[in-house]
Image (cartoon, grey):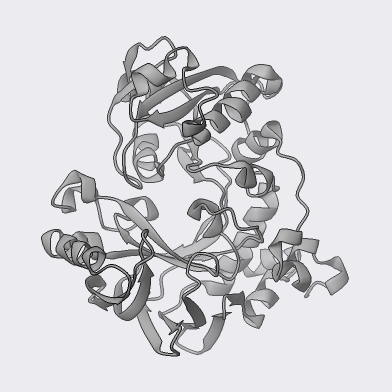
């Protein structure tokens, strides 16, 4: 049976769905977060990983602490390292709590160099000294390390979480939520979007032109990033979590792109690959550089993910949280082996290109174009998923089912 409006969680009510900044979150609680995400924790040895361009000197005696240039690393030290040392580790029955630093990878989901340093500045090895000796690894970094750590956790049998780009907004919202609830909401969305044949996305440009991208999904099972890494099986949680995603089997059409310097372009897609970028406005040099990269290493343009957010969260100006917001969607190019795909680092011409780069479509991120409509197509029906950056009536109904009905559907 459907839940009544009165019984819905407040964050799923329309006034909050349309205005996530009005949602009230509990205070960040490291003990609650780790217990919920990782239980059981008793007997686990835990450590914190951070990254720097010069890890040996900056980790030594915590030389980075208080330096505004290292906000992510200072957040990791204050809320995770100190939190563990100030009682959380003991309360959860854990041991360890050390912090280590590795060399910044310079790209999303690039493999990590093996050298790592402790707070004495001593050089160690991730493969020899860290991965085999810790049960839970918390990686709080500049760039996402989800893909490399997902591969390593299966090799060395540990669990962990990646939390790149962490800031105060994320601490106070995306990491303050109850991940049991996040998991249930992600499952509701996963069931509603499961096993589609294809997806069509209509993008509306400022002049009214409509670009349509088509992605073939081949009836695959929807996957979810839901934040829970419980039990003992090796796994990595990407936090904040809360999305349903697919690995495209084919793609064609066009979609817009906003580059880091603000340049706007149109990307042409054929046979799952971005093959060309054309300037809308901004820097032609930016477009030319992208086209040269596509020509030199075509794998950099292969579409490796289509994702839909499932959470009600405020804008954090970090894609790791903002792509989890209900009503947004994202595409990604590059490696997708950590998502169950077939694009692995060895397929790229050079290591530096083997990234997994998300392209987020959200009002604050891409105000120059609108997601007018996302249509998901099954063999027997078509459902609208997103309309004008808002979850459709179909999605809201799916997120509103009772837990009893969800259990039956799952």
The quarter of the image holding the N terminus is bottom right
Q: Residue at x 68, y 66 (%)?
A: 406
Q: Residue at x 32, y 58 (%)?
A: 341
Q: Is residue 318 left or right of residue 23?
A: left
Horizontal arrangement in the rendering, residue 380 relative to residue 102 (left or right): right
Q: Is residue 237 above or below residue 188?
A: above
Residue 192 horizontal/vertical position (percent): 58, 73
Quarter of the figure with residue 152: top left
Q: Number of numbered discs present?
A: 0
Residue 366 in percent (x, y) is at: 47, 69
Identify the residue at the far right of this view: 6
For this rendering, which residue is in front, 282 or 396? 282
Give x and y (percent) for residue 301. Answer: 24, 64
Which of the 4 image quarters holds residue 342? bottom left
Q: Is residue 238 visible from the viewing direction of this image?
A: yes
Q: Is residue 9 visible?
A: no
What is the quadrant of the C terminus in the image? bottom right
**Which residue appears at 43% of the width and 21% of the height?**
100
Using the image as rendered, state which of residue 190 and residue 32 is in the foreground.
32
301 or 37: nearer the viewer: 301
Percent across and percent down for residue 397 are: 69, 77
In this picture, residue 7 sits left or right of residue 63:
right
Is residue 47 toward the left or the right of residue 169 in the image?
A: left
């Amino acid at each position: 049976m459907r839940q009544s409006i009165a019984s819905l969680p407040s964050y799923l009510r329309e006034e909050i769905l349309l205005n996530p900044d009005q949602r009230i979150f509990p205070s960040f609680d490291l003990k609650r977060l780790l217990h919920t995400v990782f239980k059981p924790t008793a007997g686990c040895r835990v450590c914190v990983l951070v990254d720097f361009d010069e890890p040996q000197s900056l980790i030594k005696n915590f030389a980075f602490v208080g330096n505004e240039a290292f906000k992510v690393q200072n957040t990791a030290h204050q809320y995770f390292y100190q939190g563990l040392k100030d009682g959380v580790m003991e309360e959860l029955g854990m041991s360890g709590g050390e912090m280590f630093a590795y060399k910044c990878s310079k790209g999303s989901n690039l493999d990590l160099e093996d050298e790592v340093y402790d707070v004495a500045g001593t050089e160690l090895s991730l493969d020899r000294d860290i991965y085999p000796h810790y049960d839970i690894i918390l990686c709080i970094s500049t760039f996402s390390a989800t893909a490399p750590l997902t591969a390593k956790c299966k090799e060395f049998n540990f669990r962990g979480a990646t939390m790149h780009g962490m800031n105060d907004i994320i601490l106070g919202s995306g990491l303050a939520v109850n991940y049991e609830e996040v998991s249930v909401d992600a499952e509701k969305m996963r069931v509603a979007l499961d096993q589609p044949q294809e997806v069509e996305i209509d993008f509306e440009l400022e002049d009214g032109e409509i670009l349509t991208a088509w992605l073939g999904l081949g009836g695959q099972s929807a996957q979810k990033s839901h934040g829970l890494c419980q039990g003992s099986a090796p796994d990595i949680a990407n936090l904040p979590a809360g999305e349903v995603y697919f690995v495209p089997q084919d793609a064609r059409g066009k979609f817009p792109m906003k580059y880091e310097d603000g340049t706007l372009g149109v990307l042409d897609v054929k046979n799952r690959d971005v093959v060309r970028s054309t300037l809308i406005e901004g820097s032609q040099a930016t477009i030319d550089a992208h086209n040269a990269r596509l020509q030199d290493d075509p794998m950099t343009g292969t579409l490796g993910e289509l994702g839909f957010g499932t959470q009600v969260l405020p804008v954090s100006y970090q894609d790791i949280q903002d792509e989890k917001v209900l009503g947004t969607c994202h595409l990604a190019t590059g490696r997708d082996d950590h998502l169950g795909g077939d694009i692995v680092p060895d397929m790229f011409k050079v290591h530096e290109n083997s990234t997994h780069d998300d392209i987020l479509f959200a009002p604050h991120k891409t105000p120059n174009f609108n997601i007018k409509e996302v249509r998901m197509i099954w063999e027997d029906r078509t459902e609208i998923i997103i309309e004008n950056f808002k979850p459709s009536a179909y999605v809201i109904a799916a997120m509103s089912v009772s837990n009893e009905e969800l259990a039956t559907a799952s």
